[in-house]
Amino acid sequence: MTQFPRTTVGGVSLSRMIIGTNWFLGYCHSTAGKSRFMTRIVTNRDSIADIIETFVGYGVDTIMCPHTKTCVPEAIEEAQQRTGKKLVIISTPSFSHTPETAEKGFDLDEVRTTLDTEVEKGVTFCMPHTSVTDVMLDKCQRKIRHYEVICGLIRERGMLPGLSTHAPESVIYADESGLDVETYIQPFNAMGFLMHVEVDWIARVINSAKKPVMTIKSMAAGQIRPFQALTFSWNAIRPRDMVTVGTASPEEAAELCEMSLDILSRHPMSQELQATRSKATLLS
């Protein structure tokens, strides 16, 4: 089986495709009913481990997740036991914030406790979630407030700091200020889903970033079909950047890996197409 291309971030080798976990946890960006259905079917250790195991078979050994308060850590451990492969874990923790946080900074006791838990769970890249990052974005002073301290605490614990953001300014200001991060998370897809400005503007931000970028929302939470989404994503980013994908089954995971390998090697798509009666006249 062909293994997925790799890149290097902060001295760590990781697959250019990243396993996303929103679909594992019912975060479908659709309806509450669909979310409950997904949670009922997928959100358990063994189902998630089955999907991770499929990805690992293609050399996709990097996973992005809210790591410490879900069943994902158990699923990762199960998949590692089955495959004998250690995954590279990217975690996106949250810290509480109040109206005073902008001036006084985060509760560092809470931050330390959270980060200690991340270490216990085997996290490699610690990238505080966009819900934390973007509320500290200061567009007047062109900086992200109080993040130097957070990055330092992450480094002290042997993890690599990164910046998870939906705001393109965060990437630009972090680069300008020399913030101690190794990588960025940024939404990027062909329809502009959850992106603050037009797609071509985000493409420029990603391609101009001083550090590798982990793109997310590549299929716009299922609103773009995989072939269109992945063809766009793989051709609009640099060889050092990454694409995060979410699936709800091992079969989907295999399709996304094979489709991406075809796109990256510029081969015609080789995957089985979904057959319906309306396409009967296309078949010989």
Image: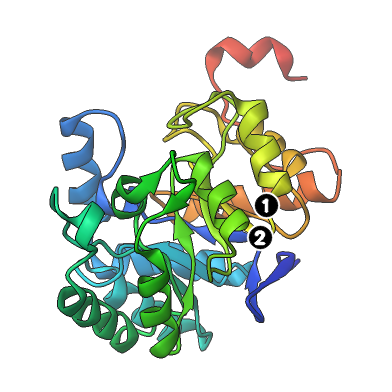
Viewer-nearest residue: 60 or 195 = 195
Nearer to us of marks 1 and 2 is: 1
Q: Position of residue 66 (x, y in %)?
A: 30, 63
Q: Residue at x 31, y 38 (%)?
A: 28
Q: Position of residue 101 (x, y in %)?
A: 19, 56
Q: Secondary structure at mark 1?
A: loop
Q: Residue at x 49, y 66 (%)?
A: 162
| Quadrant of the snapshot with the C terminus | top right
Viewer-nearest residue: 94 or 91 = 94
Q: CA distance from mark 1 to mark 2?
A: 7 Å
Q: Residue at x 45, y 45 (%)?
A: 141
User: How many numbered marks are there?
Assistant: 2
Identify residue for label 1: 209
- Name which residue type carries label 2: Pro
- Labelled pair 1, 2 in contact (Cβ < 8 Å): yes
Identify residue for label 2: 212
Q: Is residue 88 left or right of residue 273?
A: left
